[in-house]
């Protein structure tokens, strides 16, 4: 069995993963899904990695030797923190889920412009009648999530990440040398599928695993996502 470290995205909490966590625990795995610090604009990505590492160490690290290892998973903005954690802990695999793949020395605030994000959204919005990039979160983020669950998710929004974490260059010289995977959501209206396929090819040099879901896949397709994560853990040995 594996230990999954689930890192949430911007504005979110560890609650985002609760349905996936239940699925993974039912399969016999351990799960750590911490709340990253919020409400402090001085914090940087290293501080978020510190928080995740501390949560893992306190919860499960002493027992990891009895398992196949740690699988570090980063959702959306969590993609900037997940590689930092995978480099610090004995990670067996790193998985981006609809994630922002960092480049050495690139500030998260520059990621959007450097990769042509706005142009990609405009092009996809022209094709789908303005669904992609829509200002209504129920349309852009939660279109395939049950309405009550989506409302609950929105009620948990908070001030994360900080301004400092977006402005500072990503601190690693390269991504960690662990098996790396990407889960792409084909119905994502925040990160268009065609855009992410290009990002994954350019920055990771791999073919993503695709799932028919919107950006908040852990809420809309938890069973399918948990099964996919379990397969990636098994492939890492």
Image: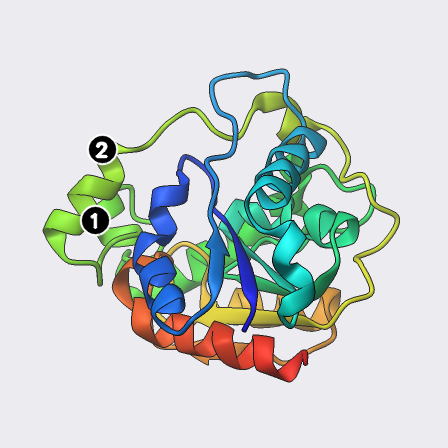
Q: How far, Cα to Cα, is label 1 from label 2?
A: 13 Å
Eyeballing the image, is 19 above or below 8?
below
Q: Is residue 114 visible?
A: yes
Q: Estimate how packed mark 2 is, as few (under 14), some (14 to 19) or many (20 or more) residues with alpha carbons within 10 Å.
A: few
Is residue 142 shown left or right of residue 160? left
Which secondary structure lies at badge 1? helix
The C terminus - image quarter: bottom right
Residue linked to disc 1: 138
Which mark is nearer the camera, 1 or 2?
A: 2
Please tell me which residue is depicted at 22% across the width and 63% down the height of the picture.
144
Residue in front for this viewpoint, 154 or 143: 154
Which secondary structure lies at badge 2? helix
Residue in front for this viewpoint, 201 or 224: 224
Residue at the far left: name it. 148
Residue 177, how many percent across, how many down? 82, 65
The N terminus - image quarter: bottom right
Q: Is residue 118 visible?
A: no
Is residue 106 shown left or right of residue 99? right
Residue linked to disc 2: 155
Is residue 121 shown left or right of residue 217? right
Is label 1 in contact with label 2 (beta carbons under 8 Å)? no
């Amino acid at each position: 069995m594996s230990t999954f470290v689930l890192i949430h995205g911007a504005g979110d909490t560890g609650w985002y993963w609760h349905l996936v966590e239940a699925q993974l625990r039912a399969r016999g795995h351990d799960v750590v899904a911490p709340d990253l610090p919020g409400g402090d604009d001085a914090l940087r990505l290293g501080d978020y990695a510190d928080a995740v590492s501390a949560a893992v160490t306190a919860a499960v690290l002493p027992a990891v030797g009895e398992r196949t290892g740690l699988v570090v998973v980063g959702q959306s903005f969590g993609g900037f923190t997940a590689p930092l954690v995978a480099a610090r802990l004995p990670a067996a695999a790193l998985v981006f889920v609809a994630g922002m793949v960092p480049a050495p020395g690139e500030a998260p605030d520059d990621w959007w412009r450097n990769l042509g994000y706005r142009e990609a959204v405009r092009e996809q919005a022209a094709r789908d009648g303005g669904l992609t990039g829509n200002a209504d979160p129920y349309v852009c983020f939660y279109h395939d999530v049950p309405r009550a669950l989506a409302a609950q998710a929105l009620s948990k929004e908070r001030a994360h990440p900080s301004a400092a974490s977006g402005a500072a260059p990503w601190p690693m010289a390269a991504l960690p040398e662990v098996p790396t995977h990407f889960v792409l959501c084909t119905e994502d209206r925040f990160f268009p599928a065609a855009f992410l396929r290009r990002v994954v090819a350019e920055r990771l040099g791999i073919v993503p695993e695709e799932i028919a879901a919107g950006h908040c896949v852990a809420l809309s397709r938890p069973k399918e996502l948990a099964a996919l994560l379990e397969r990636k853990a098994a492939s890492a040995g």
